[in-house]
Amino acid sequence: MKRSVALALLSIGIALYCLVPFLWFVLTSLKSAAELTAIPPKLIPSFHLGFYQSALEKYGLLHYIVNSVIVAGTATLITIVIGSLAAYAMTRLYLGWTNIYLLILLAISMFPQIATAGPVWNILDRLNWLNTYQGLVAAYIALTLPLAIWILTTFFREVPREIEEAALIDGCSRFQSLYKVILPLAAPGILTAALLVFIYAWNEFFFALIIMTDPSVQTLPVGIALFPGEYTMPWGEIAAASTLATIPLIVLTLVFQRGIVRGLCAGAVKG
Amino acid sequence: MKGSHRTALLFLLPSFIFVAVFSLFPILESFRLSFYRLILTLPWLGQKMVGWQNYIDLAEDPVAVESLVTTLIFVGVTIPLELLLGLGIALVLNDVFHGRGLLRAVVLIPWAIPTVVSSQMWRFIFNDRYGLINFIFFGGDVSRYLAPLADPHLALVAIMAAEIWKTTPFAALILLAGLQGIPDDLYEAASIDGATPWQKFRHVTVPLIRPALLLALLFRTIDSLRVFDLVFVTTQGGPADKTNVLQFYGYKKTFAEGMVGYGSAIAVAVFSMSLVFSLAYLRFLKSSRQEGMAK
């Protein structure tokens, strides 16, 4: 009995630790300008939407959201298609150096961004792809492929070979067997990989910062990091933009938490 | 079999093109550029081979040396605290029956928040006028309010706190996976032998959680060595370079000052440090895989 009370208290403590700082920011976004600067701070705001309105109208927040959706969405789609092809080849077709490729991918995923940033910038400059969606999308595909391929190979391995062999005997080509047999059976794994890639691309800052210097194509993290204001920061608008950038991720995380935990473990633990 | 080999190469090709163009070539190019003098703001100097000069400059650059020390302090302080706190959270998550799924989802929230957002959030919490931290410590006494992020003694502590908050959940999840891999009968056997909860923790949990702990340690260290977003948003490396971690310094030299050769030398230095831990990580995966096969 004593033990279960202690566990309950610890659980509440953990939940507060995880929730309170961000909740404070969300509440800040719902304050009025007067409530924001009040001392002592007002705990419960008046649920004013003024900061959201001003973030959207004065700071062009919608524009950053659209850019983020385009970049993260396109990158996720292409990464999953390319990653599925690679994972299929590595789990279903004979290849001697599959493990070496997987290790190279793993090593690449550990590169500090600065180690490749300069040359990547240079390549995109020569292609005239700086400040374009395709430039950032291309960089993100390369950044997320290792993660995607690792997760996808883990899930593809679990699809029984017999099912696919039956399809091949029935005259399916390799490509048909991939998208008619493997993809439907590995759908939960593909969803997990897509989610993790999307979250990565949605949150990525370093490459977005150096590739997108023109505000009209910048993504949300860059917009939020470079929020204008030298002497008085527009904290209400920053909190509003931050809330809007984060809510979709929190919803996705809560809905798909089981898959995400499994995907993280497939990427990090299982090997 | 030959046809299937060709299909395999065909399927692998698109992924390899992206990896080769945007990861493998750039890393080699960074190594090459680190031996050149190339300054974008002085284009008439061109690209000149200077041998090890950039590395010699790097070793003699007091800002770089301080940046290395700052990075090592950042990693050395945050990682042990994250692992300790993460282990505590993992132990609770492993024991809770009611609402375990919900609690695990809540623990994922700091992980899911974009780093830029959590950085702005902590910047606001540490704000010198409206920050929650100031109110908690000093109440309404505005005259005593501090500006932690602008204080040379406090800035690094403040960003380390923000980092620990954000990344502990990830460590907790890896450790939870490790805890769940410990067979129940070991605990039952210990109970039958009359072990106290502490003895069970000390003699069953601790030895068996060690691989997961090592994994979380390596994984978090590799990630922590490349801290950037947090510093960019909260302090820009300041005050007085007190939070100027290596990746931020490399960014500043390469992209703000256009010192491509020197910036590449910093990039290679950061890369080499993280490579040591990456190789340890790969070795660890290999040995744990062999162990898994032996079982």
Image (spheres, coloured by chain):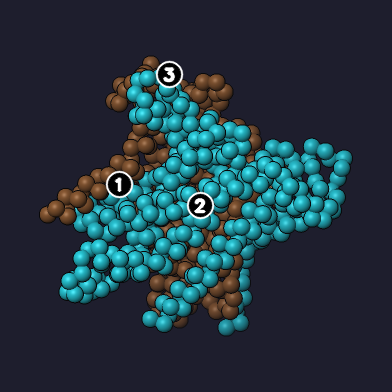
Chain colours: A brown, B cyan
Q: Amino acid at mark 1?
A: Ile
Q: Are the residues under marks 1 and 3 on the same chain? A: no
Q: Amino acid at mark 3?
A: Ser
- The one nearer the camera, A37 or A45, is A37
- Report helix, strand or loop for mark 3: helix
In the rendered view, would you say B34 is above or below A170? Answer: above
Q: Where's the N terminus of chain A, which quadrant? A: bottom left
Q: Give the residue drawn at x 23%, y 70%.
A: B187
- The one nearer the camera, B88 or A270, is B88
Which residue is denoted by mark 2 in the rendering? B76
Quarter of the figure with residue B52: bottom right
- Report helix, strand or loop for mark 1: helix
Q: CA distance from mark 3 to mark 2?
A: 34 Å
Q: Give the residue drawn at x 86%, y 45%.
A: B46
Q: Is residue B86 left or right of residue B114?
A: left
Number of other residues with Cα within 10 Å of mark 3, as a class: few under 14, some 14 to 19, many 20 or more: few
Circle 1 or circle 2, nearest the eye: 2
Q: Give the residue drawn at x 20%, y 65%.
A: B196
Residue A75 appears in the rendering: no
Give residue A172's mark: none
Quarter of the figure with residue B204: bottom left
First-in-chain label (3 vs 2): 2
Which residue is denoted by mark 1 in the rendering? A14
Q: Is residue B111 left or right of residue A14?
A: right
